[in-house]
Image: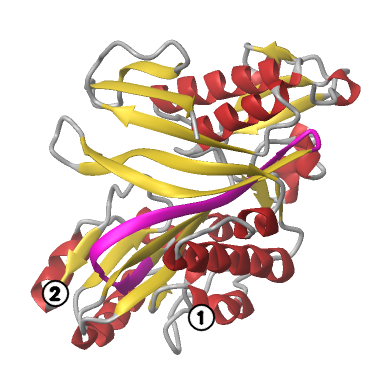
Amino acid sequence: MIHAENRRIVIATSPQADPAPEDACSNRELARWLAEIQGLEFFDGPPAARDPRRRYYWVPSDTLVGREQARRLGVQGPLDLFGGYVEQAHQAGKAIVHPLIEHAALTPRGWAAGFAERVASVVLDGHSAFCRQDAWRCASARLPRGPQRLKPAGGRGGLGQRVVADADELEAALAGYDEADLLAGLAIEDDLAEVRTLSVGQAQVSGVLLSYHGFQQQNRNARGELVYGGSDLLVVRGDFDALLGLDLAAEVRLAIQQGRAFDRAASQCLPHFFASRRNYDIAQGVDARGRQRSGVLEQSWRVGGATGAELAALQAFVADPALQAVRASSFEIFEDKALPANARVIYRGPDRHGDFLLKYAMVEDL
C-alpha cells in the first residue's frame, strides 16, 4: 500500500482559462484514479471551493509556471503534485529543445541558452523562434538541408505542425500561425521519414518510482487528421538504471539514454525546476540525406497521453509489491466499442469539435 502522506486530498486543476471539456474531464478522472491508488480522498469540486485548512495533492493539466502559481496552490516540490514546475512559460514547451538563431530579434525572458547547448547531442537538429521575423530567417536558412517541420511550442498531439520544403510553403505555413502562437515559441527542425516515436519516462507517487519505455500509436480523427492514438509501455519498478538493466534492442536503449540525458540537463540547467512526472518523446527515422537519426522531440512535465498507462502500471505495482515489471497501454480512439473488463475508461464523449472520443487504459500480461 502506498503511504498516504498526511492524508492529503487529491484535486485536479487547469491553469488554462478555458480548457477543452474533454481535457478537463480526463484530468479529473486521472486525479480520481490517483486518489484511489493512494487511498486518499478526492475533491471533485472547483479548486476555489477547497478548504484552505486542508493539504492537497494537485493534478494540474499543465506544467505549473512561476512562483506565484505554485504559491497559490501550496506546491513546494514534487511530492505536492503529479506533474512539474518551471520558472518561465517557454520552459514548459517544445521551444527549449533547440537554440535560437544567431542575433535573434526576440529572446524570451529567462531564456537558458546553456540548456539547448547541453542537449544538442540528444535532440534533432533545429532552432527555435519567438517572432515571425526570426521564424522566417531561421526556416529559410535551414531549407537547403531538406524539408523542415514547424511545431508550435505549446501544441499537443501533433496538432498545428506543418512540414515545408520551399519558400512558398514556408510563407503559407507561417501565415497560418497567429502572433500568440509565435510568441509562445515555434520549434523548427529537420523532418524525418519512416518515423516511429518512442516514449521514455518516469513517475513518482508517494514513494513509488516507476520508469518506462514504449511506443506511440497514431489514429485519424473524424476530420482526417493524424493525431496521437495511445502509448504501449513496458514499465519497471525503479529508476532508469532498472530499465536499462533489461534486455533491450539497441534503438530502444539509445532512446532511453537520450531521454535520461535530457532529463538530467533539465534538472541541472533550469532554475528551480522539479517534476514528479517526466515524459520524453524520441523520434527515430531517416533525414533528407538518408541518414538514421534519433532525438528527443519534446518534454512533458504534466499529465499526458501516456498517463493512463502510467497509472494502470502504478496500480498494479501497489497491488503486488513483488511485481517488478508490467506492460501497460493507453488508447485514444474515435469510435465507441466494448472494452475488456480490466480497462479503465478515462473519457467517453464528444471532443472539442463535437466528434466522438474514447480514452482508456489497461495493464496487459507480460
The residue lying at 51 percent from left, 80 percent from top is 120
Residue 286 at x, y percent in the picture:
25, 73
Kindly state the secondary structure of the residue where label 1 is placed.
helix
- In this rendering, is residue 261 above or below 23? below
- Looking at the rendered image, the disc whose residue lies closer to the viewer, 2 or 1, is 1
| Residue with the mark numbered 1 | 121
- In this rendering, is residue 110 above or below 34? below
Image color mode = secondary structure
Residue 282 at x, y percent in the picture:
43, 61
Q: Residues within 10 Å of mark 2 (few under 14, many from 20)?
A: some
CA gap between label 2 and label 1 equals 25 Å
Q: Is 213 on the left or on the right of 3, as rendered?
A: left
Q: Inspect the magenta stretch and tell me whether residue 265 lies in it.
A: no
The residue lying at 29 percent from left, 22 percent from top is 357
- In this rendering, is residue 365 above or below 269? above
Q: Is 20 on the left or on the right of 272, as rendered?
A: left
Q: Name the quadrant containing residue 163.
A: bottom left
Query: What numbered label is drawn on residue 165?
Result: 2
Kindly state the secondary structure of the residue where label 2 is placed.
loop
- The answer to whether residue 65 is visible is no
- Please name the amino acid that badge 2 sits on: Ala
Residue 72 at x, y percent in the picture:
76, 35
Residue 165 or 320: which is nearer the viewer?
320
The residue lying at 72 percent from left, 47 percent from top is 238
Q: Residues within 10 Å of mark 1 (few under 14, many from 20)?
A: some
Residue 211 at x, y percent in the picture:
63, 47
Find the magenta span and give its range.
187-207
Q: Is 181 on the left or on the right of 250, as rendered?
A: left
The residue lying at 54 percent from left, 68 percent from top is 258
Query: What numbered label is drawn on residue 267?
Result: none
The quadrant the N terminus occupies is top right
Q: Name the quadrant containing residue 288.
A: bottom left
